[in-house]
Amino acid sequence: MTELGAAQRSSTQPRRNTGQARPRRLREVDTDLLELTDTRIHEPQRIATSKHGMVSTAHYSATAAGVRTLEQGGNAIDAAVAAALALGVCEPAASGLGGQTMMLVHYRASGTTVAIDGSSRAPNRAVIDSFANLRSDRRRGHLATTVPSSVATYAHVLERYGRLSWATVIEPAIVLAEEGYEVSLLQHRLTRRERKHLQSRSAGPLFLHDGRRVRRAGTKLVQPALAATLRRLADRGYEDFYLGETARLIHEDMEVNGGILRADDLAQIPHPIEREPLAGRFRRNRLLTMPLPGAGRTLVEMLNIHQSLPRELQDIDTPEGAVCLAQTIRQALIDRRDRPFDPNLYSQVSDKQMLNRRYAQQVARQIAEVHSPGETTHLSAMDSDGNVVALTQSIENVYGSCAASPQLGFLYNNYMSAFDYEDPAHPYYLRPNAVPWASVAPTIVLKDDTPWLAIGSPGSERIPPTILQVLHRLQGCPPLAAVDAPRIHCSLQGVVSVEASRIATDVLTALEGAGFELNRREPYSFYMGCVQMVMNEGGRMIGVADPRRDGAAAGPDSVTTEAD
């Protein structure tokens, strides 16, 4: 996802920091404040504790759905799916029934952790010639969507690892769609930013007032078409999305609007694949994260490099430490781009250099030598039995394809933009039934083989660096402070995005002096990810929701048991 407001349009030219904060665009800020006149905006609970379970999501209504599920006797898997379905209602710009979902599940009964690869699929009619000269069609409109896989992924994990029925878990999302929720200031800004694309596509009538105007923050959004779709799925089972009435409506909508997704694509239900998580080390703890097509190996490489630096260069709040962090991020992103492979075709891979600790140590030495005396959404859930979920899902860009059926009420994804279109040898080159390349890295950290932390973030290539920085800060900061702290990100091109007004001027000067171009972002920038994490400290579960978006953390006061 991309930045909001004036920061999104900031100059690409390097700027020397003068020690003064950059003036804010008062016209835009004042407009936002006017939108809030006589409106009371909900302020989410950013940190919570409970002995009975914990849920942290990117929207307080989805968190409430997860907590309610725990209170009904559901486990962390039930709560995560309930929250994920609710996020598709109250955070529609980031995820929904039309997208894809990936997660790590630690299942206490077997003591195992499994990666659930819920990738979507390119339609059978997806051939390169259809997109060669139509770059915009990969991003917006009906042609941009892959076969949605979230619904199949939810059903799979509920059947294998959950306690409650499909109908019970989906109910909170139905109620939320029927009764509505308050549009947040962030959602108002996102919608305003994407208004012209929504107006020009079929999703406009669903998310714009009268199909034209952006809804004010604090007003209620009710989604009757989505509620009806969810109710039908609850009554008829998830298969209806792929083989029943819902599938028929998707097929007809695509036919009328020039899409290539058809009933035969949906009938080949995109069941998720269970994979072995990638393993790494975070200090003395075992870290498990998402394998390809996710970006867990990028996170593992960043951790390996950063932890191999001399101790004095690991402090990311010093000038030298910040420069080393930027170089670590950039090197791992370069390696990811240079070493893509399809997890189903291991013969394409000559080695696992990105996961090799000796390689990381070599890179760290090279970095240290220079410096010596130098929209996606995520949720995390835990229950008192020891089950843990880290779940990341998306419709790719903000508001996905900006296309939707008015009869169904959910946005189609635009994952057709996530394929390679230039190199036929590339593992993610567009071909029928191919899976898109993803940047997600839901992660679970274990202490003594017991889950301690579940963490993740949205943010495309910024996901691994965001997780890395929070993990690093957890060594010396309370949980909320670790998430709240300012962040940086370095792109492949050497542009370092910074929450500049919250970062010391000598750090900014050092980054520029090391040859990086600075892109100054607003405080608590939407661009810099949004961590949702839960942790278990001796049976006391702590949840933290990133203040950069609308997230909330909460746990139940008590739960229903079988004896009840």
Image (cartoon, helix red, strand yellow):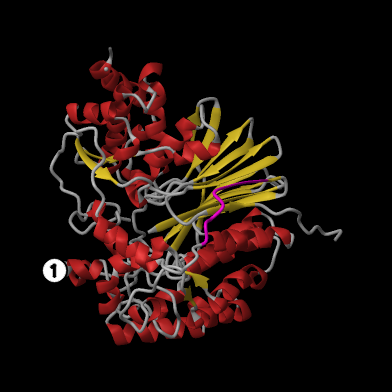
321, above or below 412, in the image: above
Residue at the top extreme?
Answer: 373
Q: Pinpoint residue 269: horizontal percent, then vertical percent.
A: 48, 70
Image quadrant holding the C terminus, namely: bottom right
248, above or below 452, in the image: below
Residue 141 is left or right of residue 269, and the answer is: left
Residues shaded magenta: 42-49
Badge 1: few (under 14), some or many (20 or more) residues near its Cα, within 10 Å?
A: few
Q: Pinpoint residue 186: horizontal percent, then vertical percent.
A: 39, 60
Q: Residue at x 32, y 37 (%)?
A: 350
| Nearer the observer, 112 or 26 | 26
Residue at the right extreme?
Answer: 563
Q: Pinpoint residue 395: horizontal percent, then vertical percent.
A: 39, 64
Q: Is residue 424 magenta?
A: no
**Residue under pointer 1:** 133
Dominant SS in magenta: loop
Q: Pinpoint residue 14: horizontal percent, then vertical percent.
A: 14, 39
Q: Is residue 43 magenta?
A: yes
Q: Residue at x 20, y 68 (%)?
A: 136
